[in-house]
Each structure stands twice: as C-alpha cells, then as structure tokens.
Image: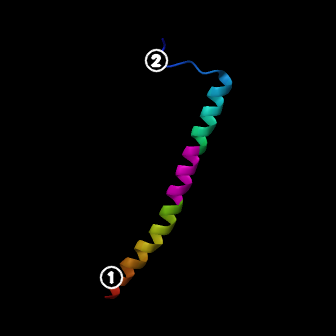
Amino acid sequence: MTLLPTLTQELTIHVARVLNSLLNLQNLISVLIANILGPLFALLEQLRIAL
C-alpha cells in the first residue's frame, strides 16, 4: 500500500495547470481588492483630515 499514489504525466500536468489557474485567480482577486481599498482608504483619510 502506498500512501501517495504516483500520478501519470498527463494527470500531473493537468493538476499543475489547475493549481496555476487557482493561484492566478488568487492574485487577480488580491489586485482587485488592493485597487478598491487603496482609494477607499485615501478617501477616508481625506475625510478624517477635513473633519
């Protein structure tokens, strides 16, 4: 009994592509959040200074 079954080369490539896609998606979400929160925090800072 093997704890980690070996993957075929095709399956390994498929798994690698799926993981790569997930990491790219995570990166895009991080950039999107940063692009939204950056200006939002700048606006809140301006409001704080104005008050």
Image colouring: rainbow
User: Type of residue at label 1?
Assistant: Arg
- Disc on res. 3: 2
Disc 1 element: helix
- In magenta stretch: residue 25: yes
The residue that disc 1 covers is 48
Count of marks placed on residues = 2
- In magenta stretch: residue 16: no
Q: Position of residue 4 (x, y in %)?
A: 49, 19
Q: Position of residue 18 (x, y in %)?
A: 61, 39
Q: Quadrant of residue 16?
A: top right
Q: Disc 2 to disc 1, how far (Cα)?
A: 58 Å
Binning the other alpha carbons within 10 Å of mark 2 as few (below 14), some (14 to 19) or many (20 upward) gives few
Looking at the picture, tell me which residue is in the foreground, 39 or 2. Answer: 2
Mark 2 or 1, nearer chain start: 2
> What residue lies at 33% left-to-right and 82% top-to-bottom?
48
Q: Position of residue 32 (x, y in %)?
A: 53, 62
Binning the other alpha carbons within 10 Å of mark 1 as few (below 14), some (14 to 19) or many (20 upward) gives few
> What residue lies at 57% left-to-right and 38% top-to-bottom?
19
Q: Is residue 39 left or right of residue 17?
A: left
Q: Nearer the viewer, mark 2 or mark 1?
A: 2
> What residue lies at 54% left-to-right and 18% top-to-bottom?
5
Q: Position of residue 33 (x, y in %)?
A: 49, 62
User: Type of residue at label 2?
Assistant: Leu
Q: Is residue 9 left or right of residue 19?
A: right
In the depicted structure, whether residue 45 falls above or below residue 31: below
> What residue lies at 48% left-to-right and 11% top-to-bottom?
1
Disc 2 element: loop
Tell me the magenta residue range.
Answer: 22-31
The image quadrant where one finds the C terminus is: bottom left
Looking at the picture, tell me which residue is in the foreground, 49 or 36. Answer: 36
In the depicted structure, whether residue 13 falls above or below residue 26: above
